[in-house]
Amino acid sequence: MKYYSLNKQSPKVSFSEATLLGQAPDKGLYFPETIPQVDKDLIEHIEHISNEEIAFRIIKPYIGNEIPDAELQRIVNETVNFPIPLVPINETISSLELFHGPTLAFKDVGARFMSRCLGYFISQGRPAASGLNRNSSNTLKKVTVLVATSGDTGGAVANGFYNVEGVEVVILYPGGKVSSVQEKQLTTLGNNIHALEVNGTFDDCQQLVKQAFADEALNKQLFLTSANSINVARWLPQQFYYFFAYKQWKEKGQLPVISVPSGNFGNICAGILAHISGLPVQHFIAACNANDVVPQFMQTQNYHPKAAVATISNAMDVGNPSNFIRILELFQHQFPQLKEKLSAYSITDDETKATMKRVFDEYGYILDPHGAVGYLALEHYLQQYPQQKGMILETAHPVKFYDVVEPVLNKKIELPEAVKQIISLQKKSTLLKNHFDELKSFLSGL
């Protein structure tokens, strides 16, 4: 499998090269040259196939022979070694709970997979991206993973890459705009994990990261790669849990509508990729908060990035979602085909809180703010198509947003063991002004 840049100005690369580079030299996102079609036998017998085997069979065509099968199976097994249950909320809506991993968020899947792939490539002394490497060394010995987070990515990447030999991780997050639990998850590990608290928004953090990748002098000094969902090794494995959801979907004759809380759009993009590969899905919903660039695009066909607005569903506070270009590519930039498969809704904070309260009162189910956005967006869609049924992706454990959830529900949320272990730990972060020179100085000192 080869990967091309969506900017079409860079050479095609292998999976390992795309993983190591993160972004193409022309600043485009990598995209698979062909979309593999899933074996129909897997779909027909999916209820009798283990999650580990499903994941292996889904990801293998994207990697080819670059990772030996036994090693790839180990990586996959460690990636999906926690429950991902589909839990009914009521007769028409179920919740795919993606928060049972080590950092209680869906990004554990992509971060664990990518960290293990990167660790393997480094351990093999993999030649650095066939001459595309911006480091003068021919053999890869050390990588600096640079990532911006609006909340959950930081903790998942920190956990996934913690103490991986040959990897330094630098996480930029917007000060005061992530939850207290999220902040603890990305700032308390230390060692090879470096947290930078930026005086700005997530979009500011993402812009600083892009500037770092574009800086020639810095890239001659360091080998930089990204662990955001722009990286194919973070993005592609997110297909796994859509297949796990279908495996648990009881009414195979009535395909599910899937509502995905959407910020940078990597998650829903992976789901659509899975569908185009052969996964049966009725329709996708991009559930957005007040950051409504994509809902507006779906109405007007005009894409206008905006400054991000802070909301209680902070992991979705993105004003210029990087992965939406991949969704357009999946539909060959044909808007009618996109419109047929994707709807998008914008949900306010007040609506989010009201949904959390109503669902808890009526069904006893606790939604986190992101899941609540997904739930209400799905309800809006089902009002138009009452004969259909669907699921939301519950992307984070409610405890990660206890300061929002508890006052709304008037209920104390029990701390999972993973949170109990970090809540009293000392925060270790470096304050960073929203200036690239400061980031460059920090990176140069690693």
Image (tube, helix red, strand yellow):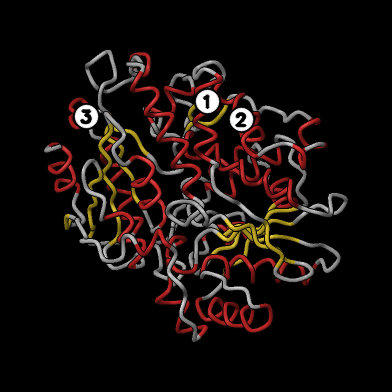
Nearer-the-camera pick, 311 or 403: 403
What residue is drawn where x is 39% and y is 58%?
Answer: 151
| Viewport quadrant of the C terminus | top left
Q: How far is mark 1 from mark 2, CA to CA? A: 7 Å
**What's under tag 2, amino acid-wise?**
Phe
**What's under tag 1, amino acid-wise?**
Leu
The extreme bottom residue here reads: 410
Give the mark nearest the N terminus, 2 or 3. Answer: 2
Q: Secondary structure at mark 2?
A: helix
Nearer-the-camera pick, 104 or 438: 104
What residue is drawn where x is 46% and y is 57%?
Answer: 104
Q: Which residue is mark 1?
A: 72
Can you give x and y, in whole percent of width and height, for residue 103 in the image?
Answer: 42, 54
What residue is drawn where x is 65% and y is 36%?
Answer: 332
Vertical arrangement, residue 338 with respect to residue 365, above or below = above
> Which circle, 1 or 3, is nearer the viewer?
1
Image position of 121 (left or right of 232): left
Image position of 298 (left or right of 24): right
Image position of 237 (left or right of 170): right
How many residues crowd around disc 2 within 10 Å: few (fewer than 14), some, or many (20 or more)? many
Can you give x and y, in whole percent of width and height, for residue 435 in the image?
Answer: 18, 52
Q: Secondary structure at mark 1?
A: helix
Q: How far is mark 1 from mark 3, CA to CA? A: 28 Å
Q: Which residue is mark 3?
A: 222
Give the mark nearest the N terminus, 1 or 3. Answer: 1
How many residues crowd around disc 1 within 10 Å: few (fewer than 14), some, or many (20 or more)? many
> Which circle, 2 or 3, is nearer the viewer?
2
Residue 56 has which mark?
A: 2
| Viewport quadrant of the N terminus | top right
